[in-house]
Structure formats: C-alpha cells, structure tokens
Amino acid sequence: MSISLTAETTAHRLSLVERMWRFCRLLGAGFAAHWMFYAIGGLYAAVAWVFVFRLPGADLFSAWKMLKLFVVAAVPAMLTSALLGLAVHRFYLVVTTIKPEQPLIEFVRIFKADIVDMRRYVIGVPMFFAVFIFMCVFEEIKTNIPIVNPYSWDETFMLWDKWLHFGQHPWEWLQPALGYPVVTFIISKFYAVWLVVMWMVWMWLAFDTKLSHLRTRFFASYMLVWMLGGSLLAIVFSSVGPCYYTNIGLSPDPYSGLMAYLNTANTVYPIEALAMQDMLWETYAGNISLVAGISAMPSMHNATALLFVLAVWPVNRTLGIALALFAFVIFIGSIHLGWHYAIDTYLAYAVTVLCWWIAGRFATWHNRRDACRRFERMLNETSGVPAAT
C-alpha cells in the first residue's frame, strides 16, 4: 500500500514538474513573441530621457512612490475589473446562447475553465508588463509637461472653440440640456467609470487565448495614441483645460459660470470630477498621489473611448454600440465637467483614427513574425483547459 502511494506521489510530482516546465517554456515563448512591445516601450523611455527627463527641473523622484501606489491600488482594481467583466460576459453567454437547464452550474464551469486556462497567463503576463512599463514612462512624461513647455495654449484653444461653435463656448450650448444637478451627477459617474472600462477592455485583450490581429492592433494603437497624443502633442500644445483657466493666471474667465454651476450642483449631489480636479492641482503643486499630471490637448479620455469602440465593434456589435454611446457621454462630459475644450476631442479622434490605421498594418506584419508563429503553434499544442467561446 505504501509503495503504491509513493508511486502515485512521485507520479504526481513528476506531472507537476512537467506542467511547470511547460508553463515556463510557454511563458518564455510569450515574452519572445511580445518583444516588439518592449522595444517600443524602451524607445519611448529613451526618447523621454533625452528630451524630457534630463531637463533642469524635471521631477523623477515621484517614480518610486507612484509605483508603490500603483501596485497597492491600481493592480488589484485592474484584476477585479477584469474578473468582473469576464464574469458578466460569461453569464451573458450562458443565458443567451448556451441556455442550459442549470445555468448557474454551467456558468461556474465555464468561468472556472477560463480562470485555470494557462494560455491566458502566458499570453497576458508579457503584455501586462509591457504596457505597465510603458504607462510608467507616460506618467513621468505627463508630470513634467510644464517643465518642457509651460502651459500657454489655453487662451488660444478657448478662442478657437468659440469660433468653431458659432460664437458661443461649447459648454454654453450644452448647459440648457445638461444644467441640472442630477444630470451632471450621472455624467460625472460615467466619466469616473472610464478608468474601469479601460481596464476591462485592456485586460480582456491582454489575457486573450490567442495572438489575434485585433489584439495586436489594439495594443499597438494604444501605445501609439499615448505616445503621439498623450506625450508629443500634449507637450507641443501644453494646456490645462477650462477648469484650471484662472489657476494659470488667465482673465477674464469664460468658464466661471460653468465652474460656479458645478460647485452649486456639488452641494446637491457629489460631483466627483471636482474632487479629482482639486487632487490633480494639488499634485501639480507638489503632492504625490496615484493620479498626476495635467494635460488637456488632446483629450486622452476621448481618444481611448473611441479606441474601445474600434476594438470591440468587430467582435460584438451590441457591445460596440454600448461603448459608442459611452464615448459620446465621455465627450459631452469632458466639456460639461470643465475638463476639456471641444477641440481637444476633435484632435484626439483624428489621432486615434490615424493610429488605428497604422496599427492595422503593423499587426499584419507583427503576427507573421517567426516568434509569433512559433508561440501560436505552442499554444495550439497545449493541452490545457480550453477557454469558452
């Protein structure tokens, strides 16, 4: 009996070692298949070092504190958002498509299969770290924008906004329809949810079970949009946005009526945007928080909201429509809550469409590389639990 148990234990250990070895081999192949994204991040960091971080007055001392805050607060939130999004999608699939006799049991089975599928981790972990490193560089660049180019475009953008919108500021056009505290409260909530939506889309595609053209295109677009829009153009057109118009010494303030209304609405319902605006300005003044850096042009909220639509539309038309409506709310919210000039969004949309087009060609080339094809073959040969489709 003991000999039999010993043999079973040895076999189990060998099986565990084999599984771990296979996982490590797949993970190594996954990093090799994603090396281009690390190269992009490295090039981004190198350019930032030469043109931003070496300038007199550039602040890099917040990097370690930001990293700790990110690990403690953002990573758990990202994982929670990803699991929530996956659970909602799988439950929707069970109820509307599979329609089993015991939907809850079938949902648990499918959800568990998704969680234990090793393919998600050997594909997702390399992309997760690539984008994590990339966004750390972005945050440092954004924090140092006024060091490179002091805020100087707000008055110009205010005038352009008024000229483009027939002599009235965009917020004035929207105020009759949106100027009710309960409406502003709802819009502010949607605006705050943007980060969760980004995490859901981001994690869904990062931890997909295959190196699809859409996945590669999304992350290539994601990096291009943040590099071109969030860094280069943000530095060239350095601006703070309507809510900080007087903070940088501009007068008269055409947004004083909007900000007065928002503060009044905040006494009726909590308007989260105002607290976030205060936090960002305090960070700009020297405090350290998870959110840092002020930049209005172009609007990255709106750029990424459009990117979500472009990524999801080919997969699920209903969800694509929902995200299109969400992008519209983000657009009007960015104006109504005092974050952006309308032209911040117009340029953001143009940058996003251009980056999506470029990334499509990049994805076609990237996924034909030998490292990607080898990784795909290894994934196809993996005997792990397949993901539900």
Image (cartoon, rainbow, N blue to C red):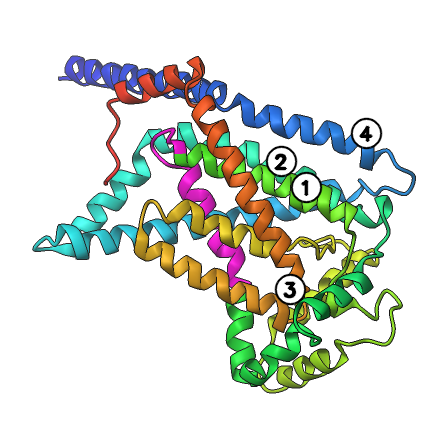
Q: Amino acid at mark 3?
A: Ala
Q: Earlier in the sequence, mark 3 or mark 4?
A: 4
Mark 2 or mark 4: which comes first in sequence?
Answer: 4
Q: Are marks 1 and 2 in contact (CB under 8 Å)?
A: yes
Q: Quarter holding the C terminus?
A: top left
Element under label 1?
helix
Image side of residue 6 versus residue 294, left or right: left
140 in relation to 238, above or below? above
The quadrant in which residue 320 appears is: bottom left
**Label 4, residues with CA under 10 Å away: few <14, some 14-19, many ≥20:** few
Q: Is residue 193 magenta?
A: yes
Badge 2 crowding class, 10 Å Cα cut-off, few under 14, some 14 to 19, many 20 or more, is many
Q: Which residue is mark 1?
A: 138
Residue 310 colored in magenta in the image: no
Mark 3 and mark 1 in contact (Cβ < 8 Å)? no
Image mark for residue 342: 3
Tag 2, which secondary structure? helix
Label 1 to label 2: alpha-carbon separation: 6 Å
Residue that numbered label 2 is attached to: 134
Marks 1 and 3 sit apart, C-alpha to C-alpha, by 23 Å
Please give the range of residues in magenta: 192-213
Query: Which residue is depicted at the point 30% across and 33% down?
Result: 117
First reached walking from the N terminus: tag 1 or tag 3: 1
Magenta residues, dominant SS class: helix
Relative to residue 6, is residue 127 drawn left or right? Answer: right
Residue that badge 4 annotates: 50
Name the one closer to the observer, 357 or 266.
357
Q: Amino acid at mark 2?
A: Phe
In the image, residue 287 sits, relative to residue 163, either above or below, namely above
